[in-house]
């Protein structure tokens, strides 16, 4: 029996953790998109109602309004997957052979029995924690590691249409803030 056969089944746990990370990232992108769209709607409303104000006063009033009424920003901060497995396999094999013969009043018999057993047990406990809000030192270490791995030119996943939507909304907000902060001529 191969011990690797049992423990190799734990590879599927890594797939589960990877899927969890991708699903959390996709859900966070949707939360980010909703936040940016809510912020954009708030800015549109503020700009419509502050049309008559002067350049600096309008920009400052707009920023104060956005700060006081800004929508909630939801963020996944930590996700934990715990997996525990108790793997066991048992094999048994036995053989018995017997025979006898009778000669007049004498009976002769012989028997042989042979048994074999094997049992394998293993246990595994895997905990994976995914953090969404790292501290500044972690970001610095990750950037250093990213620079070091750039030599291998890893292939990044393709951007999704949701990524482009988020970028477009943030660009609109940035343009709107930049335009409202400039004094009107």
Image: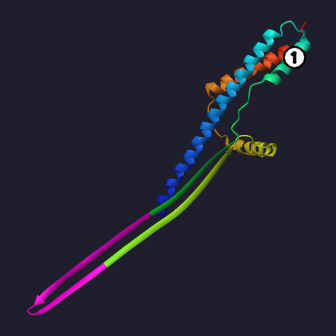
The question of residue 167 being in magenta is answered with no
Task: Please provide percent x and percent y for residue 90.
Answer: 41, 66
Residue 172, quarter of picture: top right
Report the number of numbered marks: 1
Q: Residue at x 49, y 54 (%)?
A: 9
Q: Magenta stretch?
A: 89-113
Q: Is residue 170 above or below residue 102?
A: above
Please indicate, yes or no, whether residue 106 appears anywhere in the rendered image: yes
- Where's residue 1, x and y in %? 43, 65
Relative placement, left or right, of 92 versus 27 is left
Crowding near the residue tagged with mark 1, few <14, some 14–19, many ≥20 C-alpha atoms within 10 Å:
some
Is residue 97 in the magenta section? yes
The residue at the point 68 percent across, 38 percent down is: 76
Q: Quadrant of the C terminus?
A: top right
Residue 60 position, x and y percent, is: 89, 18
Q: Residue at x 81, y 21 (%)?
A: 66
Relative to 105, residue 97 above or below: above
Q: Work out whether residue 1 can be spotted.
A: no
Image spot of residue 180 (x, y percent) = 85, 14
Magenta stretch, overall SS:
strand
Q: What residue is shown with label 1?
A: 61
- Vertical placement of residue 81 versus 48, above or below: below
């Amino acid at each position: 029996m191969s011990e690797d056969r049992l423990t190799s089944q734990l590879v599927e746990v890594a797939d589960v953790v990877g899927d969890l990370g991708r699903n959390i990232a996709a859900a966070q992108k949707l939360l980010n998109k909703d936040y940016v769209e809510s912020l954009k709607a708030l800015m549109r409303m503020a700009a419509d109602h502050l049309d008559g104000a002067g350049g600096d006063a309008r920009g400052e009033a707009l920023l104060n309004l956005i700060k006081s009424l800004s929508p909630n920003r939801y963020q996944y901060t930590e996700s934990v997957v715990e997996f525990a497995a108790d793997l066991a396999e048992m094999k048994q094999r036995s053989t018995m052979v017997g025979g006898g013969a009778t000669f007049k009043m004498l009976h002769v018999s012989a028997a042989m029995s042979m048994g074999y057993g094997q049992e394998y047990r293993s246990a595994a406990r895997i905990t994976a924690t995914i953090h969404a809000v790292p501290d500044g030192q972690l970001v610095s270490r990750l950037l250093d590691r990213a620079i070091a791995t750039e030599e291998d030119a890893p292939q990044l996943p393709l951007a999704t249409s949701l990524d482009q939507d988020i970028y477009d909304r943030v660009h609109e907000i940035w343009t709107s803030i930049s335009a409202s902060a400039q004094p009107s001529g």
